[in-house]
Amino acid sequence: MDMSEEELNRMTQVLHERFGYSALRPGQETVVEAVLEGRDTLAIMPTGGGKSLCYQLPALCMEGVTVVVSPLIALMKDQVDGLRAKGIEAGAVNSAQGIEEYRRVMQELRTGKLKIIYVAPERFAQDRFMSQLTECHVALLAVDEAHCLSQWGHDFRPEYLRLGRVREQLGNPPVIALTATATKVVREDIVTALRLKEPAVIVSGFARSNLHFRISHCEGKKEKFLRIRRTVAEWKKGIIYCSTRKNVMNVYSELKEMGANAVAYHAGMTDEEREFSQNAFISGQADIVVATNAFGMGIDRPDVRFVVHYEIPGSVEAYYQEAGRAGRDGKEACCELLFNHADLKTQEFFYEGSNPSLSLIRSLYNLLVLLCGSSPSGEVQLSVDEMAARLGRDVNPMGVGTGLSVLMRAGAISRTDVPGSKTKSTRVSSLDVPFAALEIDSSILNEKAARDHRKIEAITRYAYSGCCRQKWILDYFGETGSKPCGQCDICLAAPPEDVHELSGTSLNILRKALSGVARASGRNPDGTRRPIYGRSKIMDMLRGAKKATLNSHLRGLSTYGILAELTDQQLRALFRAMQDAGLVESSGGDMPLISLTDLGDRVMKGKLENISMSTRGWGEEKKAGVPQKLGASSRALSAILSSAQEKTALYRELVATRMELARQFHLPPYRIASNDSLHALASLRPTTVQGALRIKGFGAWSCEHVLPALVAVIQAFCEEE
Ligand code: ADP
Ligand code: ZN
């Protein structure tokens, strides 16, 4: 069911009048539509992505009250005050307020005055509160920070588990769950716990268009230091993350030797030292901080120009969060991962440390039973390192630390601080309970281990991937519809063959064409551009066509006839290349409209030098597009190829298969096969791999991985014909 026009108008009006925004962000729009259609919705957006509006706007368009569950009591007051200032009836119920205020809010709720009520999760356990709430008509249940209901999230809150039942008690209103972080498991937990029915799952807003991602494969330390030198020279201010304290100090010394203004930060330093480093970096006194992942929580220096990872981190989630500290001010910034396969050992060490074997936990427990049993106080004061040493020479102390947490969670032991000592005291809850009788669910431990392992595998895949870095990450998070970013190392290392860095005439032609696209678009009320013409109209305008179909608006533009020297065919090639390079985009549908992308805008304004794109068919660097490999028959082939490169049905099937292969191998499509190779395949129709090998662009790797699939398509096609 789609939203009616009337509903849409009403929503837009509320958006303008109450919230003062000119438009919803694309992700918000999808979410709000789903909610207003009455669907259960799971919205995953980064912090600052605009989650609040996703339930506040529907709340104002629906009959009844919207109940917002949020664990952030401190922020509730701000939210409520903000809404009230906009004339929206909102209130909050939490432990931070006095009885007077509570009574007032409940009174407003009962009389149906409230549109939005914020509720702390523990409140739903109170029968009196619940019975009053169930009297009301609840339009929507919004669960903010929804990852809190997953044990796998970083912030589990048991009170959240009650919410599925609460929903039922409230008469099953539609639910919107919102969070900034949700891995697949956490998403599944949210859907199960809140009993979401065929939910619309919308991931959006994770793209960071000002970040230039790059992965540099480095042989060793020397190469890494060289990369750091370059990056520091180019981008100046930033963070260098290392996996270990030792490497923090190594890199720090290297920077000092370079004369860089740097500080170090890791958990082994004293509180004062760390505070000093942190303040120096935040205040801008230091340009660079070298740190372990302990650094960054709550750091909001906006002008961080680079984030370098000296070693591969443990997960894509952690990588993107840390890299994302670059360029908060929206200006260009660089995120570079220095990758060496051997560094994965460190991650494996951490993995083992946070996933100790059951037998290690058993030995640890038995050791503690023994020691506590023979100690007069029944307690033992031993550091984690000492315990590890007692358990054996190769025992990973980090694993022992994790083991202690597991035992504490199972209620098997308790640990308390000892005044005047850094070492905690440990007590076994009851000495006569054998390990086997403890409440430790090994299947949960195994599951967590498997999950952690998959995370390392994922970041390793990222390090070895060969397609747009930004797009890879967005795909990983489940954000659909992203396009190659145009500025990561892969996007800039353009495809072989027909791609060139533009200069001179070609660059000039490109800029003229982009200005034409810009001029030939309308303006939204907020000043952003809105596409209004399709490609052929814009091309006619650029050519200066006298056609009657060209309206006076297009004929009156300053870009009218600005590319009169190009033929129709050249213009078409140019537009295709601009679209492939992500400079313009088309709206899709039957009558696609063309508009400039941000990237195109920057190229047009000359803010971005070094633009590489295909010049085939329009630019000055054009080469003869004749595959050399075919020898004698090459003239025939070139004739076929140049016959307007018509897109036959077979060609389209080959393109689709290429896309599948690209996904399968995590490669950009052009690495699988160039368009020309596909055209050649479609024209020559070889039905054996051997035959296909005569076409340029296919080698040994293709012979094994690519051609069998493509040839199968040709075979099936020929049989059908
Ligand atoms: P989140 O809860 O996802 O961290 P918020 O809901 O606090 O994000 O919104 C972040 C910021 O974005 C706020 O300052 C908000 O006013 C602004 N914002 C949200 N939606 C829009 C919009 N459609 N247009 C303009 N600004 C918006
Ligand atoms: Zn890219």
Image: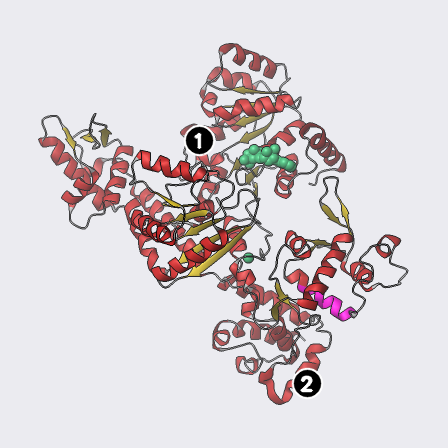
Which residue in the rendered view is the most extreme toward the bottom? 632
Residue to which mark 2 is pinned: 636
> Quarter of the image holding residue 557?
bottom right
The picture places residue 264, in percent across and down from the top left corner, at 35, 44
Image position of 554 with respect to 706: above or below:
above
Dot 2, crowdedness within 10 Å: few (<14), some or many (≥20)? few
503 displayed left or right of 398:
right
Asked whether 16 or 376 is in front, the reply is 16
Asked whether 112 or 585 is in front, the reply is 585
Q: Is residue 243 visible?
A: no
Image position of 147 with respect to 357: above or below:
above
> Quarter of the image holding residue 16?
top right
Between marks 1 and 2 in the image, the one whose residue lies nearer the viewer: 2
Residue to which mark 1 is pinned: 161
Q: Which residues are magenta?
A: 568-577
Q: Residue at (48%, 44%) from the top-left corner?
A: 325
365 displayed left or right of 266:
left
Element under disc 1:
helix
